[in-house]
Amino acid sequence: MASLGQIIFWSIISIIIILAGAIVLIIGFGISAFSMPEVNVDYNASSESLRCEAPRWFPQPTVIWASQVDQGANFSEFSNTSFELNSENVTMKVVSMLYNVTINNTYSCMIENDIAKATGDIKVTDSEIKRRSYLQLLHSKASVCASSFFVISWVFLPLSPYLMLK
């Protein structure tokens, strides 16, 4: 049987391994934030408009609008994007408007920085509105660090009860 001292020692070692993995994750990602966009029809506008909103991004992303029907079209002259600093003064809220949209078309609002790319799709027809959002991590260093953390956790933590008995 393991003594109380051995149990405490190996418990501390396990905690140190977990903390080291968490530090690797923080270093890998740096200070960053990203969130899923929500795309809606803006009924307050004078013409048919879409509003794309994402609550938290850092560093400042770029926003690009695309259309399935008008592939390759440049929507910059029909859009307006703003970045509002959140109350914690670190992340920003992204709000982008697309004006002069047509019915029976699917539009995509793509928000991207060095860390992540988030896309919100909306299809507006006469009878319904369909939405879809997805997020993709782009920063390979962060992905490697996250993988390393989980490998460390999965390898060492199950071994800790066996190590305590030695």
Image (cartoon, rainbow, N blue to C red):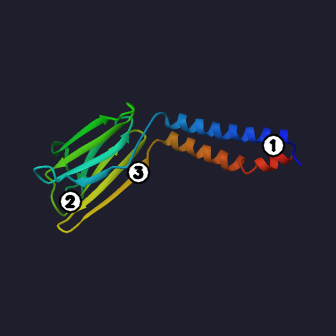
Q: Nearer the viewer, mark 3 or mark 2?
A: 3
Q: Position of residue 49 (x, y in %)?
A: 17, 52
Tell me the element at label 2.
Answer: loop
Q: Is residue 100 left or right of residue 150?
A: left
Outermost residue on the left side: it is 46
Q: Position of residue 98 (x, y in %)?
A: 19, 48
Task: Give the mark, 3 or 2, whose residue is nearer the N terminus.
Answer: 2
Tell me the element at label 1.
Answer: helix
Q: Is residue 114 left or right of residue 70?
A: right
The reply to whether residue 112 is visible in this rendering is no
Q: Which residue is mark 1?
A: 7
Who's the residue at 49% across and 34% down the image? Answer: 30
Real-space Cα separation, disc 3 to disc 1, in angstroms: 42 Å
| Crowding at mark 2 (Cα within 10 Å: few <14, some 14-19, many 20+) | few
Q: Which residue is mark 3?
A: 135
Who's the residue at 75% across and 41% down the image? Answer: 11
**Is 43 above or below relative to 91?**
below
Please name whichever residue, 95 or 121, is drawn nearer the observer in this view of the structure.
Answer: 95
Who's the residue at 54% across and 34% down the image? Answer: 27
Tell me the element at label 3.
Answer: strand
Q: Which residue is mark 2?
A: 69
Disc 1 vs disc 2: Cβ atoms closer than 8 Å?
Answer: no
Q: Is residue 156 left or right of residue 149?
A: right
Numbered tag placed on residue 145 in the rendering: none
Amino acid type of the residue tagged 1 in the rendering: Ile
Who's the residue at 89% across and 49% down the image? Answer: 1
